[in-house]
Image (spheres, rainbow, N blue to C red):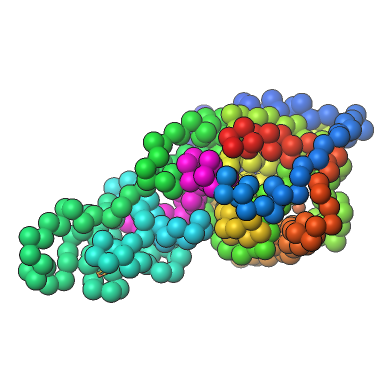
């Protein structure tokens, strides 16, 4: 088989069953026909103050978000020779990729007097960053390379004034960092199976078609819950995508602290899997909860990546990325991406995030003491068990 043929066969524009990882294929083959998919009963509740309490928020910050690796952005956003500022966790960060491809995460604070080196959150293609205040200039590896009127500083040692760096690495096509510079980084929460699955889905090499930041008045777990259950889909999304999905349990696998849910859409049948060359994301949805706060969901022509960054008990910053395999080659392709981007923002932004804000206001009203979960929401409890194991 020639290399060209291999590339065409594995063209992620049309992700067929055989392009996926062995583990994904095995999970997909376990999806039962809809009429054989029994939905279990569940008797489970959670106290409302896990969504509203300051103490719980502080505990999650201390034990998880400031100590463990957290997702910052998608790797593919940063080409060699580029830099981006990031404020999602309430900490000013600067993410850079040097010309030679090395990735760094720094605190976005000039070593003269702490000014932010870049204020906006756009990608800047440049090999140096100059502070807007007194024009100190840093290379993308963090070294101070020039200070204006350097001769006016006595005993000045440039090498002691490099940018403050956080431990970081790339994994599964995502940039991860540990926000506490004092913590000894423990990368063991980053799981190899997630890496393998995301590589098979083309995430590390995908193209960012669009990205959007949402500032939500809801706890990050309230924002996350709908991505862990299918119960709301036919109801909340009745006017948009609801008819494409069925009320069926997911085939759920846990890899370390990470969750993979695979479910058959309304048109799924096990026999349809034998149709070689079919776009697998048309009949099957993959949804990942990458610990602690990253959601990845497949659609036939694109993949959604969301990073849910807690800011306060009732406040979350969400960064949404729509990843596509390549730049659109034709007008039809561009129109498809444009339409998809609008639809996904309408569904996630206008429906899921809207519902999260509505829920949060009710939870904060004191009307209920616990939330309650059905057998179609089982994965939420799986996630809470994993999260609580770290608190
Ligand atoms: S604060 Fe950056 S150069 Fe002065
Ligand atoms: Fe939803």
Q: Position of residue 25 (x, y in %)?
A: 67, 28
Q: Is residue 139 left or right of residue 370?
A: left
Q: Residue at x 30, y 73 (%)?
A: 132
Q: Where is residue 246 in the image (x, y as percent from the top left)?
A: 86, 43
Q: Residue furthest bottom?
A: 133
Q: Is residue 227 left or right of residue 230?
A: left
Task: Say whether residue 71 is magenta.
Answer: yes
Task: Say whether residue 94 is magenta.
Answer: no
Residue 11 quadrant: top right
Q: Residue at x 73, y 43 (%)?
A: 228
Q: Position of residue 324 (x, y in %)?
A: 58, 53
Q: Front-most of 25 and 169?
A: 169
Q: Front-most of 202 and 252?
A: 252
Q: Give the range drawn in magenta.
A: 60-82
Query: Relative to 288, does residue 206 appear above or below in the rendering?
Result: below
Q: Residue at x 31, y 65 (%)?
A: 114
- Quadrant housing the C terminus: top right
Tally the marks: 0
Q: Residue at x 39, y 55 (%)?
A: 95
Query: Relative to 348, does residue 202 appear above or below in the rendering?
Result: above
Q: Front-most of 231 and 296?
A: 231
Q: Which residue lies furthest to the right in this view?
A: 35
Residue 288, visible in the rendered structure: yes
Query: Relative to 119, does residue 370 appear above or below in the rendering?
Result: above
């Amino acid at each position: 088989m020639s290399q060209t043929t291999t590339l065409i066969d594995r063209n992620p524009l049309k992700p067929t069953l055989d392009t996926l990882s062995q583990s994904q294929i095995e999970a997909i083959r376990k999806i039962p026909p809809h009429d054989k998919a029994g939905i279990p009963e569940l008797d489970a509740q959670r106290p409302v103050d896990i969504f509203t309490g300051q103490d719980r928020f502080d505990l999650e910050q201390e034990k998880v978000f400031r100590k463990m690796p957290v997702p910052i952005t998608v790797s593919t956003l940063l080409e060699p020779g580029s830099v981006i500022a990031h404020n999602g966790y309430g900490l000013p960060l600067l993410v850079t990729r040097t010309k030679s491809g090395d990735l760094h995460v720094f605190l976005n604070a000039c070593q003269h007097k702490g000014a932010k080196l870049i204020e906006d959150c756009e990608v800047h293609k440049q090999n140096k960053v100059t502070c807007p205040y007194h024009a100190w200039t840093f290379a993308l590896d963090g070294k101070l390379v020039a200070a204006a009127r350097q001769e006016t500083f006595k005993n000045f040692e440039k090498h002691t004034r490099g940018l403050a760096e956080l431990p970081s690495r790339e994994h599964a096509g995502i940039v991860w960092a540990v926000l506490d510079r004092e913590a000894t980084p423990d990368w063991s929460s980053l799981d190899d199976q997630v890496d393998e699955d995301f590589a098979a889905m083309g995430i590390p090499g995908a193209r960012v078609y669009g990205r959007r930041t949402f500032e939500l008045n809801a706890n990050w777990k309230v924002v996350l819950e709908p991505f862990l259950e299918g119960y709301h889909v036919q109801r909340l999304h009745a006017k948009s995508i609801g008819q494409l999905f069925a009320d069926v349990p997911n085939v759920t696998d846990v890899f370390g602290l990470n969750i993979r849910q695979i479910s058959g859409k309304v048109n799924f049948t096990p026999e349809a899997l034998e149709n070689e060359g079919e776009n697998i994301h048309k009949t099957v949805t993959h949804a990942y909860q990458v610990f602690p706060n990253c959601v990845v969901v497949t659609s036939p022509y694109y993949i959604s990546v969301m990073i849910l960054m807690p800011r306060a008990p009732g406040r979350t910053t969400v960064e949404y990325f729509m990843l596509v395999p390549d730049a659109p080659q034709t007008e039809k392709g561009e129109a498809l991406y444009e339409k998809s981007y609008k639809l996904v923002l309408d569904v996630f932004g206008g429906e899921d995030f809207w519902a999260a804000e509505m829920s949060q206001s009710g939870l904060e009203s004191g009307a209920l003491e616990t939330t309650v979960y059905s057998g179609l929401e089982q994965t939420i409890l799986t996630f809470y068990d994993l999260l609580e194991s770290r608190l």
